[in-house]
Image (cartoon, rainbow, N blue to C red):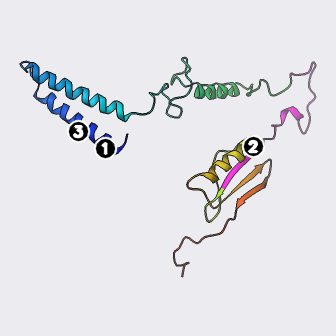
Amino acid sequence: MNHAQLTALGRALRLLGEHGEVLTADTPDDRLREVGADLRRALDLWEEGVTTAAPATRCAEHPNGPVDESAPDLCLLCETRRRAARRSELGGGPYGRSRPAAESGERVPSRYGVRADRPQPQQRWLPELWNGREWQLCGTPRHDRQEAEAYLAAQRRGPRAAPAYRLVHEFTDYEVLRVWGVPVRTDIEPMGNA
């Protein structure tokens, strides 16, 4: 809704408020017809101004997303995320049991443990941007390299792009994979701390 439409709608609603203050039981019919016409005018202004569809869910993050009737907020995307979190809390992980079934017989204790007892290494790709002084994380860490590179490509095309971006591979240690742009250190003091 643009400013002119918003102003006209506000004016029409204020006029309806004034009508409401003077209505009584003995208000003549022609006055009631005038109130009805003003009400129709306000509804027409509202319909002209609203351009988006009514939200299908009660989710603030995905108002027009797919609907799941069993979800409290009707959002299928958020309910899928919640179900995956519940599954991983139960120890199954996203793809079933993470450890192999116990072998028949008794396990022999080991000083260093068994391979299945150690946590699996996780690798992530961290998108970072240069803020003029240091590298900072600019998005959520991704588990897929192509998805992280596509995210950084979209950030570089954005209206407020940073001077430089880089993709860092985290796998027990950090390794810079690729750098876009040139990170130039800028002093935040206008006179250079003189």
The kind of residue tagged 1 is Ala
Q: Secondary structure at mark 2?
A: helix
Query: Residue 1's x, y, as percent?
Result: 37, 39
Label 1 sits on a secondary structure element that is helix
Q: Is residue 91 magenta?
A: no
Label 3 and label 2: CA atoms lie apart by 52 Å
**Region of the chain picked out in magenta, as a range:** 101-128
Instruction: Find disc 1 in the rendering and name its residue.
Output: 4
The residue at 55%/25% (across/down) is 75
- In the image, which disc is placed on residue 43? none
- Mark 2 nearby-residue class (10 Å; few <14, some 14–19, many ≥20): few
Q: Nearer the viewer, residue 55 or 101?
A: 55
* Front tag of 1 and 2: 1
Q: Which residue occupies the foreground of this view, 40 or 134? A: 40
Residue, disc 3: 11
70 left or right of 145 in image: left
Q: Position of residue 138 (x, y in %)?
A: 63, 51
> Which of the two discs, 3 and 2, labels the residue nearer the N terminus?
3
Kind of residue at disc 2:
Gln
For residue 13, what is the image quadrant?
A: top left
Residue position marked by numbered label 2 in the rendering = 146
Which is in the foreground here, disc 3 or disc 2? 3
Residue type beneath disc 3: Arg
Does label 1 or label 2 sit earlier along the sequence?
1
Rendered image quadrant of residue 82? top right
Position of the C terminus, as image quadrant, is bottom right
